């Protein structure tokens, strides 16, 4: 389930709503962020919260989309991990460690 529309993500990223040139990329970033969060948490949030993910998870998604948008494909390996630490901290209480 998509947690945010492209329009909502564009507003968060401060991208003009009438500029459609990045819509596909922003949509893909949102999906990539959702996938990363689900894999990191080891939970199917869409099944657990069919209407909407918890606020903390949605905020983490915005953090990830911002990270992807601001850095594109320039972050790899350890450098990417450093930028993920705040997101991981934000999500810690939702992670299934079993």
Image: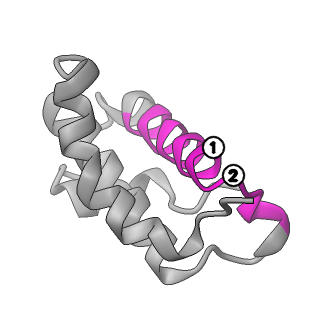
Q: In front here: 41 or 5?
A: 41
Q: Residues within 10 Å of mark 2 (few under 14, many from 20)?
A: some
Q: Magenta span covers which residues? A: 26-47
- Position of 41 with respect to 71 (left or right) is right
Residue at (30% x, 31% y) in the render:
22
Give x and y (percent) for residue 16: 18, 51
Q: Please give the count of numbered marks on the rendered protein.
A: 2
Location of mark 2 (residue)? 42
- Prevailing secondary structure of the magenta residues: helix
- Position of 58 with respect to 9 (left or right) is right
Give x and y (percent) for residue 2: 63, 55
Location of mark 1 (residue)? 39
Q: Is residue 54 visible?
A: yes
Q: Quadrant of the N terminus?
A: bottom right
Q: Quadrant of the C terminus?
A: bottom right
Corner quadrant of residue 94: bottom right
Q: Eyeballing the image, is 52 above or below 14?
A: below
Residue at (15% x, 57% y) in the render:
14
């Amino acid at each position: 389930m998509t947690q945010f529309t492209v329009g909502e993500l564009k507003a968060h990223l401060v991208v003009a709503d009438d500029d459609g040139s990045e819509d596909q990329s922003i949509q893909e970033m949102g999906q990539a962020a959702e996938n990363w969060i689900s894999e990191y948490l080891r939970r199917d949030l869409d099944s657990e919260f069919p209407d909407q993910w918890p606020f903390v998870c949605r905020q983490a998604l915005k953090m990830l989309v911002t990270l992807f948008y601001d850095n594109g494909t320039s972050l790899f390996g350890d450098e990417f991990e450093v930028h993920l630490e705040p997101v991981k901290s934000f999500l810690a209480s939702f992670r299934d460690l079993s």
